[in-house]
Amino acid sequence: MSELNHVPRRPLIAAFLSLCCGPLGQLYAGRGKRFVTLAVVTLVLMIVAAPIALWIPGGHVSFKLLMFAFACWPVFLIVDAFQCARKARQQRLHWYQRWWLYPLVFLAYLGPVSLISELRTAFIAEAFLIPAGSMHPTITPGDRILVNKLGSRDDAIDYGNVVAYYSKGPGSPQYVTRVVALEGDTIEIRDESVFVNGKQISEPYAAFDGELPTYPNMVNMQPVVVPPRHFFALSDSRRRSMDSRMLGPVPLDYFQGVASRIFWSRPREINFSVSPENSQIGAIAWERVGMPIR
């Protein structure tokens, strides 16, 4: 038996490889079929994780249990690789256990992982970090939200939906605000009260903190008819925001998706007297993790 066939398998190396690249540690330990099976399962979990996170019923508890379940998977891969290497210390090495194959397998594995990540972000769900308080109290600075991109624009945009969209077209800053009027509607603002088609709408989510702004249309806005394939969106924090009052109705082509759920939150206290970017990050707000956005 050649010297190559007596190279021992080190459990810590197997665990490290699985930490860096999923089930690569199982391949190092000589479990080729196990590597293939776990790699397929990992890719499937990457595909289904976002839709499940968007549609899971219930509130905080069910979402947190889902997060815990998905977080356990990489831990399982690491522990399993460690155990496989311990059992394989005296076993004969296979052809796929040459050291120079591991970088190739790593690169080959990254291909579908990257593709799935890009497709998931483009067509299923995208994560957004909320840096400012324009949607306070519904969404606060430091919240990380999931934006649902499934479904057509026409079906997704509806009254009251919190949506993400480009401010001035693809590549421009993205805003997250609430839809208050659709194409063909006439919207008017009188003393900060919103009227759609002549009727004042109920806005239990709206906040009017701070001093009254002096910008045109912030407090009072003359009637505006929303053009075809546009929608009119307002922030929940009406006195500290940039929305359709200044930017005008939003073209449907700028729409990105509907804000679905807060999946992580570390509140930020923003010091506007210095700069909006100057903020202090607080502790994890577990009570907000998993909160549906309505």
Image (tube, helix red, strand yellow):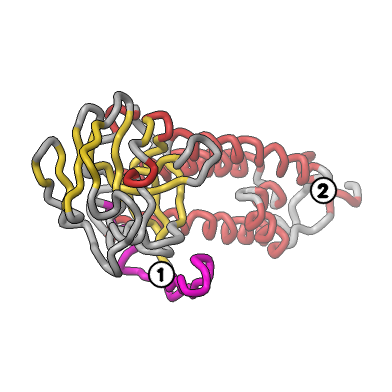
Label 1 sits on what residue type?
Pro
For image coordinates 38% across by 39% down, the residue present is 257
For image coordinates 33% across by 60% down, the residue present is 214
For image coordinates 84% across by 49% down, the residue present is 5
How far across and down, in percent of the image, does residue 171 sit?
A: 55, 39
Verify whether residue 275 appears in magenta: yes
Q: Would you say residue 68 is visible in this rendering?
A: no
| 110 shown above or below 214 | above
Q: Residues within 10 Å of mark 1 (few under 14, many from 20)?
A: many
Q: Residues within 10 Å of mark 2 (few under 14, many from 20)?
A: few
From the image, state whether disc 1 or disc 2 is nearer to you. 1
128 lies left or right of 95? left
Residue 99 is marked as 2
15 lies left or right of 68? right
Q: Nearer the viewer, residue 47 or 102?
A: 47
- Read off the magenta span: 268-293
Q: Nearer the viewer, residue 207 or 273?
A: 273
Label 2 sits on what residue type?
Trp
Verify whether residue 182 appears in magenta: no
Q: Nearer the viewer, residue 178 or 79?
A: 178
